[in-house]
Image (cartoon, rainbow, N blue to C red):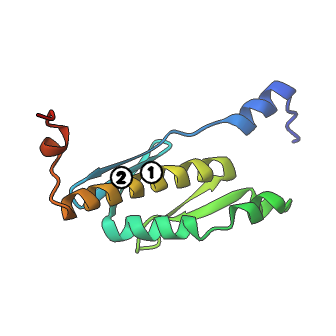
Amino acid sequence: MCKIYTRQSLESLITQIIPLSITHSGNSFLLVVGGQTIKQTTCEFLLTFSSMVGTDIEGYISNLSKEYDEVRVPLSTRGDAVVLSLADFARLRDLYGQMMFELKLQDLLVRNSIRPQTALAPAR
């Protein structure tokens, strides 16, 4: 049976966006991809981040082969992974980049003995 798509159904299929979020608490990260919640250790977070940074997204965009429409992203050292559309992959890579920036900023503040209360205290 052949399914016929209307222009509107194709647009919604192409522009469908899955919920993505990542939060950090202690030594773990909670990643939400669609309806799935994945808990990552710091090592797994770094593995996922380095994998995404190492992915040549321009290569995926320029290749018209169907296998380049989706990207496999490793999530754990046990082999857990998620397969995302190219658009969702780019969004997730941005989220991980933002989280990495926040972690580096926290580390910089701690190494310079700057505590949040000190940084937010009014100048006298």
Q: Which residue is mark 1?
A: 98
Name the residue located 38 percent from the left edge and 68 percent from the top edge: 44
The image quadrant where one finds the N terminus is top right
In front of the other: 28 or 122: 122
Q: Secondary structure at mark 1?
A: helix
**Marks 2/1: CA–CA distance:** 6 Å
In the picture, which quadrant includes the C terminus?
top left
Residue 109 location, x and y as percent?
Answer: 24, 56
Circles 2, 1 touching at the beta carbon (< 8 Å): yes
Tell whether 86 sits left or right of 62.
left
Secondary structure found at label 2: helix
Is residue 93 depicted above or below 34 in this figure? below
| Residue 80 can be seen, yes or no | no
Q: Which amino acid is tagged 2? A: Glu
Question: Looking at the picture, which amino acid does disc 1 mark?
Answer: Gln
Q: Is residue 86 left or right of residue 78?
A: right
Residue under label 2, please give it. 102
- At 76% from the left edge and 65% from the top edge, which residue is drawn? 59
> Does residue 51 appear to the left or right of 59 in the view shown?
left
Coordinates of residue 105 in the picture (x, y in percent)? 32, 55
